[in-house]
Image (cartoon, helix red, strand yellow):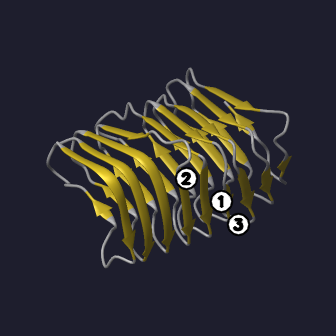
Amino acid sequence: DVVVQNAVTITNPTTHGLTTSTSGSGDYTFDELHITSTGFKGVHLGYGTGTKTFGLVDINTTNETAFFAGDASQVDVTDGASTIVATGGQALALQASDLTHTGTVTFASVTSTNSPTRGIYLDDIDGTVTINGGTITDATSGGLVVTGGSADVTYAGAINQNNTAARSVQIVNRTGGTVHLSGNVSDTDGGIYIADNTTTTVARTASTAKKSTSTVCRT
């Protein structure tokens, strides 16, 4: 196991700011992590196993995904003051197609602007993801995309989607849990798409404004 108790600051690395093994196992703990990066991911957790625990996370990236976790058995972000800002890339991507993500991830703010893929992507995960603010703007493949899994997801940030080829929100193939949206959603075309979910609950509070020429689908 690896435990780093002091604050770690990484500025303009020539590869991903923090990378873990793609095949090994092990538990890692970082109490405080600050990363600024251009052209490389801030955090890249590979397809190994073990628990990856972060206290305070502060990531600012350009032209890459800020925080990526792929098939790590558990990822936790415990400090609710954590923030992500991604310009020209995904802000947060948690993907667990083979292993089970059962952690708790909490951010004060997650922001993505002009991502060539998605703004936030949660793929087949369990556990809890809470994002209390931020803004997703004009992600090419969708603003907030939640696919599969049964995680309880709360997103209180705004979504502004002016890309006619993509949806502001897409929630599909879920097997349980709740997705709660409470921020303003402004969408000029693609709309909100909710489909092929079994026992999941999708909630939008009254404060959420939806402006779109497309239909909101619930099946």
Tell which tag, 1 or 2, sits nearer the viewer: 2
Which sits earlier in the primary sequence, circle 3 or circle 2? 2
Cα–Cα span, label 3 and label 2: 16 Å
Q: Residue furthest top?
A: 199
Residue matched to label 1: 166
The structure residue drawn at horizontal position 79% and vertical position 33%, both measured from the top left corner, is 205
Q: Quadrant of residue 135?
A: bottom right
Coordinates of residue 102 in the picture (x, y in percent): 38, 30
Residue matched to label 2: 120
Which sits earlier in the primary sequence, circle 1 or circle 2? 2
Callout 1–callout 3 Cβ contact below 8 Å: yes
Q: Classify mark 3: helix, strand or loop.
A: loop
Badge 2 amino acid: Ile
Coordinates of residue 210 in the picture (x, y in percent): 83, 47
Q: Name the residue nearer the viewer: 96 or 19.
A: 19
Count of all numbered marks drawn on residues in the image: 3
Query: Is 198 on the left-hand or right-hand side of 124?
Result: right
